[in-house]
């Protein structure tokens, strides 16, 4: 029983990392109605910017100053990217279909991928932010030997919880958040009541960039910053399907379900079918879920005239 609990908790905590990436998709979809295919590329860019700046500053300054400086540099890079995307891509697609915006993000993903590797390199970079890597042992009184937990996953859970709280308050309680939701519903109507669409898009892409940075640093602490992190970010798509494309809490719940299900299936079923189940399990679950509950657990049920 103790082993089952350990696998379950480990899966839940791993799912939080999927949720962090999914949050970036959700905030842009919630504010613009478009699925941002470039979110994985933004995770790569944010991670490379952070780790390279930290390494440069670490040659001269103490460790914590290099970490803070690396974070500040990466934040600046993501805000600049948000401004460039708004200025040269989104502004020219105002009042265009969601399909046009989605296609634009596909092209944007390739551009960000290539520029990231040209500017910061394409090697595997280790991330060190002071989080202890030793596992934490809990529940020693209930199970022999206790339950081992990953320190990085615990920090990811704390950061994700804080981000969810902040984003929920932002979208539901602030004027800017309500304006962003209005832009997602109808660009033309939002413009007609004086909502500056370019400004709102700049804000939301900056927020998505900061979420990408948080995901990159935590993912990088576990597996390093490398190009394959773009594909790890694609694990967020099943999370979105389960939780709902417009729900911030849904991104967390979906991530927990995918993470726990994936880990349990890998440990208890994978050996029966030769392994490799972690590569396709999430997508099969998402496909089944689409047939049963297409709007997701927390998604909005939309009724439109056709």
Image (spheres, rainbow, N blue to C red):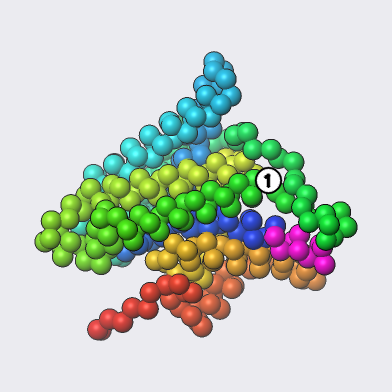
Label 1 crowd (10 A; few <14 / some 14-19 / many >=20): some
Specify whether 99 is left or right of 242.
left
The extreme right residue here reads 144
**Where residue 267 appears, x then y in whole percent?**
76, 64
Picture residue at 64% right of the left edge, 61% below the top? 12
The answer to whether any part of residue 157 appears in the image is yes
Quadrant where the N terminus lies? bottom right
Specify whether 94 is left or right of 221.
left
- How many marks the image carries: the answer is 1
Picture residue at 83% right of the left edge, 61% below the top? 142
The extreme front residue here reads 141
In magenta segment, residue 72: no
**Where residue 221 appears, x then y in whole percent?**
62, 41
The answer to whether any part of residue 31 appears in the image is no
* Secondary structure that dominates the magenta span: helix
In magenta segment, residue 2: yes
Q: Is residue 261 above or below residue 31?
A: below
The residue under label 1 is: 151
Q: Is residue 256 above or below residue 136?
A: below
Front residue (pair 159, 78): 159
**Where residue 182 appears, x then y in whole percent?**
24, 63
Front residue (pair 266, 202): 202
Q: Quadrant of residue 274?
A: bottom right
Picture residue at 25% right of the left edge, 84% below the top? 306
Picture residue at 33% right of the left edge, 61% below the top? 172
Magenta stretch, residue numbers: 1-9
Q: Is residue 268 above or below residue 88?
A: below
Element type where label 1 sits in the image = helix
**Where residue 159 appears, x then y in whole percent?**
53, 48
């Amino acid at each position: 029983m103790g082993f089952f609990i350990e696998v379950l908790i480990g899966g839940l905590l791993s799912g939080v990392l999927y949720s962090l990436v999914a949050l970036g998709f959700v905030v842009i979809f919630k504010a613009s109605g478009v699925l941002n295919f470039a979110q994985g590329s933004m995770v790569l860019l944010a991670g490379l910017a952070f780790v390279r700046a930290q390494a440069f500053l670490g040659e001269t300054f103490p460790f914590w100053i290099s970490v803070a400086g690396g974070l500040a540099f990466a934040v600046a890079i993501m805000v600049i990217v948000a401004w460039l995307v708004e200025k040269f891509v989104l502004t020219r697609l105002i009042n265009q279909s969601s399909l046009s915006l989605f296609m634009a993000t596909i092209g944007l993903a390739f551009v960000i991928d290539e520029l990231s590797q040209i500017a910061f390199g394409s090697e595997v970079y280790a991330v060190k932010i002071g989080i202890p890597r030793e596992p934490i042992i809990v529940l020693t009184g209930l199970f022999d030997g206790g339950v081992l937990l990953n320190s990085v996953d615990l920090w990811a859970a704390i950061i994700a919880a804080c981000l969810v709280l902040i984003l929920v308050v932002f979208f539901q309680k602030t004027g800017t958040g309500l304006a962003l939701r209005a832009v997602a519903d109808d660009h033309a109507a939002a413009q007609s009541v004086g909502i500056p669409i370019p400004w709102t898009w700049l804000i939301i892409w900056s927020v998505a960039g900061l979420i990408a940075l948080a995901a990159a640093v935590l993912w990088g602490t576990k597996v390093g910053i490398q190009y394959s992190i773009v594909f790890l970010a694609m694990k967020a798509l099943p999370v979105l399907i389960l939780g709902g494309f417009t729900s911030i809490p849904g991104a967390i719940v979906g991530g927990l379900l995918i993470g726990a299900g994936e880990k349990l299936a890998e440990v208890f079923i994978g050996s029966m079918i030769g392994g490799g189940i972690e590569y396709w399990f999430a997508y099969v679950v998402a496909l089944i879920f689409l047939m049963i509950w297409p709007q997701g657990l927390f998604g909005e049920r939309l009724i439109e005239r056709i």
